[in-house]
Image: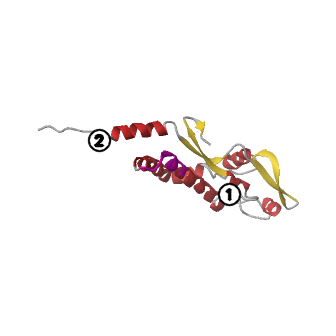
């Protein structure tokens, strides 16, 4: 007696799925077009400094500012959850959830993880002079612009899909 393997459409589904996700990247973080903000006489005003530069200084630190990683640390702390969610994109697509919906769901969760990290830390405490200047002891939060600028983008085949 021999066993016969009959493909009832699985290969077709998987090939279509691979085609839809080929090269898809979900990137969450500060997007390049945003500008930083500061307080001037109590009012929030825009600066010419790209927010991505401000984010990089905080993420990696500088000569005068300690590292306060909110991107890499979020990924490191949630790596297994993010990987499981990425695997679920595959499962969701197979279960008739559109590829776009599944990928966007992953992006939304990653965006929320980073925003939560900015709010909750933990981070190196601010210097007393910084606390006095900004009126708060909360690292990474002054105007709220950094946290609000955290977004995700979906890039298919290396191209931004927005």
Q: Which mark is residue 31?
A: none
Residue 1, compared with residue 136, is above or below; it is above
Which range of residues does the magenta coloring cover? 96-104
Residue 14 location, x and y as percent?
39, 40
- The quadrant of the picture occupied by the C terminus is top right
Q: Earlier in the sequence, mark 1 or mark 2?
A: 2
Q: Residue at x 71, y 53 (%)?
A: 146
Label 1, secondary structure: give it. loop
Residue 99 location, x and y as percent?
48, 45
Q: Quadrant of residue 157?
A: top right
For the residue pair 19 and 142, the one nearer the viewer reads as 19
Left or right: 126 in relation to 82: right
Left or right: 157 in relation to 40: left
> What residue sits right under mark 2 in the picture?
8
- The quadrant of the picture occupied by the N terminus is top left
Residue 94 location, x and y as percent?
40, 47
């Amino acid at each position: 007696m021999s066993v016969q393997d009959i493909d009832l459409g699985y290969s077709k589904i998987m090939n279509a799925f691979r085609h839809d996700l080929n090269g898809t990247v979900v990137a969450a973080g500060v997007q390049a077009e945003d500008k930083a903000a500061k307080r001037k006489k109590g009012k929030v005003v825009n600066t010419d400094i790209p927010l991505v530069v401000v984010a990089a200084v905080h993420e990696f630190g500088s000569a005068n500012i300690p590292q306060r990683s909110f991107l890499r640390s979020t990924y490191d702390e949630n790596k297994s959850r993010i990987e499981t969610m990425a695997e679920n994109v595959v499962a969701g697509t197979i279960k008739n959830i559109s590829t776009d919906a599944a990928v966007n769901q992953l992006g939304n969760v990653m965006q929320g993880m980073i925003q939560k990290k900015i709010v909750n830390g933990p981070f190196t405490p601010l210097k007393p002079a910084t606390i006095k200047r900004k009126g708060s002891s909360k690292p990474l939060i002054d105007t709220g612009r950094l946290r609000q600028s955290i977004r995700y983008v979906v890039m298919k085949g290396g191209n931004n899909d927005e």
